[in-house]
Amino acid sequence: FYSPTEQELELVAAFMRNLKNEVQKNLPNTQFSVVMHPLADQELAHAFVPKLKSKQINVLDYSDLIPENEKESMLLPIGQFPHPNAKMNAYIAKKLIQDLGIN
């Protein structure tokens, strides 16, 4: 597995800040957030979140949302990399609705 350098993380965070600015310029009433998926590498997510926050980006860190012992029941074994099944997607959707204050 490739581990990005600090400089690469900073570059991606700057890119995301620019993307946020463009989105908000074109859609001023839009809330821009980045979600760290539960299948994301937790160590990488925890290193990246502060970089995004330093760029004033709202981050929802779900990298540790689902306990490891429950993840297996929420995966589709497709190829080399696991994919979320409907159960995981519903779990994430419920959390997003809660965190973003959507009714």
Image (cartoon, rainbow, N blue to C red):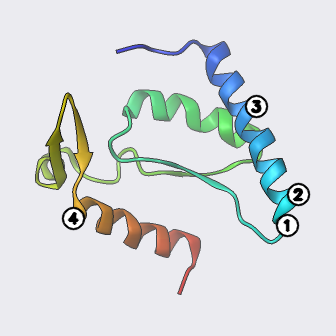
Provide the residue designation for mark 3: 14
Identify residue type, mark 3: Ala
Q: What number is the disc on residue 25?
A: 2
SS type, badge 2? helix
Q: Is residue 26 above or below residue 78?
A: below
Mark 2 or 3: the one toward you:
2
Identify residue type, mark 4: Lys
Cα separation between marks 1 and 4: 33 Å
Cα separation between marks 3 and 1: 20 Å
Contact check, label 2 and label 1, Cβ < 8 Å: yes
Cα separation between marks 4 and 3: 33 Å
Provide the residue designation for mark 4: 87
SS type, badge 3? helix
Provide the residue designation for mark 1: 28
Identify residue type, mark 2: Lys
Mark 4 surroundings within 10 Å by alpha-carbon count, few (fewer than 14), some (14 through 19), many (20 or more)? few
